[in-house]
Image (cartoon, helix red, strand yellow):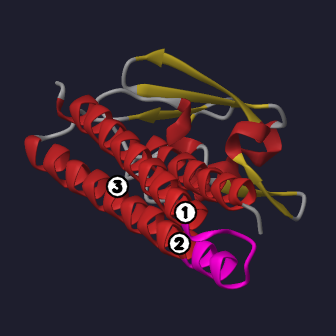
């Protein structure tokens, strides 16, 4: 592999790790209700597990409430079961036409717990980024041994990989800080 291919692959994979982290954190509750909280919940719809946001119109009528209005009213029961089975921790209120999800205010203990989950997810992302750095450095070493890169080019590539790693870790820190502040804000 060439210098540019190795560097580009490392950058792409690190960006994907950051996107994954952002997606994981989207599902963690804060003081406000967001459609992202139900994004990963799936219910059976004509034999297929379908995300709730594809089965119903999702709206936020109040700061701590999600309203689901199904396109097909016959799936209300399946949607309700899926919400109860999820880790969301709320009981759906079904009135026959819509499902309301009322989120109680978070206690200080819950906020700390969710902040811990954010920290844990961020650390997993950092580990993934460091593993990608290790793999990219291995590729650089192999390219140097095979004669595709000179010694100077390989060193320069390792420096660029380290720089990319550092930038990615800074972005993880920013994402973690922003989500923790969002959770801890009352």
- Point out the image quarter for the C terminus: top left
Q: Nearer the viewer, mark 1 or mark 2?
A: 1
Among the two numbered marks 1 and 3 on one chain, the one whose residue lies closer to the N terminus: 3
Give the residue at x 51% y 29%. 66
Kindly report the distance in space between the C-alpha atoms of the residues bearing marks 1 and 3. Answer: 34 Å
Q: CA distance from mark 2 to mark 3?
A: 23 Å
Give the residue number, with chain letter if any, for mark 3.
Answer: 122
Circle 3 crowding by C-alpha within 10 Å: few under 14, some 14–19, many from 20: many
**Secondary structure beneath label 3:** helix
Check residue 22 in the rendering and tell me which mark sits there, or answer none: none
Other residues around mark 2 within 10 Å, as few (<14) / some (14–19) / many (≥20): many
Label 2: state its secondary structure: helix
Q: Residues within 10 Å of mark 1 (few under 14, many from 20)?
A: few
Residue 5: where, in percent of width, then height? 75, 58
Q: Which residues are magenta?
A: 138-151
Q: Earlier in the sequence, mark 1 or mark 2?
A: 2
**Disc 2 + disc 3, Cβ < 8 Å:** no
Which dot, 1 or 3, sits closer to the camera? 1
What residue sits right under mark 1 in the picture? 152
Secondary structure mainly formed by the magenta segment: helix
């Amino acid at each position: 592999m060439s210098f540019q291919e190795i560097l580009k692959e490392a950058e792409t994979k690190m960006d994907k790790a950051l996107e994954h982290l952002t997606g994981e954190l989207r599902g963690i509750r804060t003081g406000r209700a967001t459609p992202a909280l139900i994004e990963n919940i799936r219910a059976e719809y004509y034999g297929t597990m379908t995300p709730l946001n594809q089965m119903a119109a999702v709206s936020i009528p109040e700061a701590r409430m999600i309203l689901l209005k199904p396109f097909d009213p016959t799936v209300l029961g399946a949607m309700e079961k899926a919400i109860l089975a999820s880790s969301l921790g709320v009981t759906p209120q079904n009135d026959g036409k819509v499902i309301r999800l009322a989120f109680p205010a978070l206690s200080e203990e819950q906020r700390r717990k969710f902040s811990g989950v954010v920290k844990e997810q961020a650390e997993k992302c950092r580990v993934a980024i460091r593993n990608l750095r290790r793999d990219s450095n291995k590729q650089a070493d192999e390219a140097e041994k095979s004669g595709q890169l000179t010694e100077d080019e390989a060193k320069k590539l390792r420096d660029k990989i380290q720089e990319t790693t550092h930038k990615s870790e800074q972005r993880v820190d920013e994402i973690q800080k922003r989500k923790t502040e969002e959770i801890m804000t009352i």
